[in-house]
Amino acid sequence: MAMTKFLAFMILAFIAISMIQTTVMASNGNGGHHNNKKGYGPGSLKSYQCPSECVRRCGRTQYHKPCMFFCQKCCKTCLCVPPGYYGNKAVCPCYNNWKTKEGGPKCP
């Protein structure tokens, strides 16, 4: 009985480790880093692409200068700018989760 439980535990542990390894490999560039069809997501940009992506992102705001400043700061750190003019931040977790001291969103 104890041996059966131990064997079941070992099989579950092996499956869990395999799933984690696959996820880490995909997020580190061994299968998913640049394969995003639309070109969005963590690490999808090079730092020289940030200005043009931020022009796109900030193109429809009345606060163009601060939007551009913070967008470029976020882009250079996260190497990602979400699609569209507003929202869609879940595509880029670093960009989405970076907060100000007050707890508000840092990235536009």
Image (tube, grey):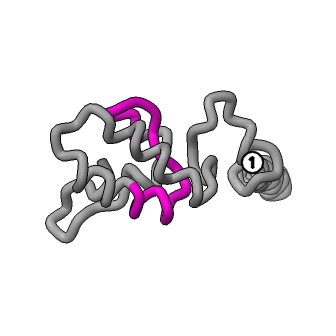
Provide the residue designation for mark 1.
26
List x then y, in percent, for residue 44: 63, 47
Q: Is residue 35 magenta?
A: no
Q: Residue at x 50, y 63 (%)?
A: 76
72 relative to 42 in the view: left or right: left
76 relative to 58 in the view: left or right: right
List x then y, in percent, for residue 91: 49, 39
Q: Is residue 79 magenta?
A: yes
Q: Residue at x 55, y 56 (%)?
A: 79
Helix, strand or loop for disc 1: helix
Instruction: Look at label 1 and name its amino acid.
Output: Ala
Q: Nearer the viewer, residue 77 or 99?
A: 77
Place residue 70 in its image quadrant: bottom left
Stretch in magenta: 72-89
Q: Residue at x 71, y 47 (%)?
A: 33
Q: Residue at x 46, y 33 (%)?
A: 83
Place residue 48 in its image quadrant: bottom right
